Image (cartoon, rainbow, N blue to C red):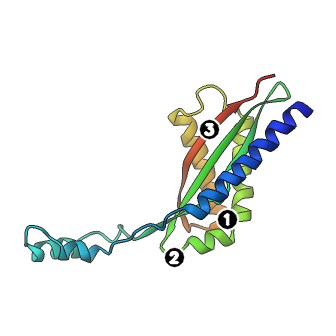
């Protein structure tokens, strides 16, 4: 057990350091209002473009993405030993202005997401070809259900941004 402790601690420290650097060096997303694209219509038919924008469905409401600050590390247990570590990064799609609410509920969201990931690992979801469509859909659905329980519909999608499996050799 002691020989797994040092690599695990180094992995967690490296992940935390990398996440911290990424968080502070990220660039702010550039947002361009929809009306400015109408003003810059190269064909000169701004009336048609303005009519098309006015008729656009309301379902195209603005969305923001809240990236979870730290990665998730989930052990994969085989024969009562840690056989691998899953490292995942998540982003959450929220309504415009909803990032602050996500960050204020982040500890509860992380707890719920980790429980879903642990359950997924325990049923063998991270064994073999863990990136199959059915496996990933099962994981995404579980994460979305957990997000809905915590945030009551404010999170429209849970995005798995990165997923890596690090096997541990004995």
- On screen, residue 15 versus residue 136, left or right, reads right
Residue at image x 71%, y 53%?
A: 16
Give the residue number, with chain letter if any, for mark 1: 150
Q: Nearer the viewer, residue 55 or 17?
A: 17
Give the residue number, with chain letter if any, for mark 2: 97
Q: Nearer the viewer, residue 144 or 14?
A: 14
Please tell me how crowded label 3 is: few (under 14), some (14-19), or many (20+) other residues with Cα within 10 Å: few
Give the residue number, with chain letter if any, for mark 3: 164
Instruction: Count up the numbered dots.
Output: 3
For residue 163, which quarter of the picture?
A: top right
Circles 3, 1 touching at the beta carbon (< 8 Å): no
Q: Quadrant of the N terminus?
A: top right
- On screen, residue 59 versus residue 148, left or right, reads left
Of label 2 and label 3, which has the lower sequence position?
2
Circle 2 — which element? Answer: loop
Q: Nearer the viewer, residue 114 or 21?
A: 21
Of label 2 and label 1, which has the lower sequence position?
2
Residue 36 position, x and y percent, is 25, 76
Distance from label 3 to label 1 (Cα)?
A: 26 Å
Residue 130 position, x and y percent, is 60, 32
Residue at image x 7%, y 72%?
A: 44
Of label 3 and label 1, which has the lower sequence position?
1
Image depth: mark 2 or mark 3 in front: 3
Circle 3 — which element? Answer: strand
Residue at image x 55%, y 73%?
A: 98
């Amino acid at each position: 057990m002691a020989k797994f402790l040092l690599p695990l601690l180094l992995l967690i420290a490296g992940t935390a350091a990398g996440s911290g650097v990424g968080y502070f060096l990220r660039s702010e997303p550039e947002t361009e209002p929809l009306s400015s694209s109408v003003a810059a219509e190269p064909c000169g038919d701004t009336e048609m473009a303005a009519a098309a924008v006015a008729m656009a469905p309301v379902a195209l409401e603005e969305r923001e993405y809240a990236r979870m600050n730290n990665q998730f590390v989930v052990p994969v247990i085989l024969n009562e030993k840690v056989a691998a570590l899953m490292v995942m990064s998540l982003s959450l799609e929220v309504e415009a202005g909803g990032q602050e609410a996500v960050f204020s509920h982040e500890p509860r969201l992380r707890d719920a997401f980790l429980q879903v990931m642990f359950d997924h690992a325990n049923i063998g979801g991270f064994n073999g070809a863990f990136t199959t469509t059915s496996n990933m859909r099962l994981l995404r659905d579980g994460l979305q259900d957990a997000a809905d329980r915590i945030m009551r519909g404010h999170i429209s999608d849970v995005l798995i941004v990165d997923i890596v499996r690090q096997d541990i050799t004995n």
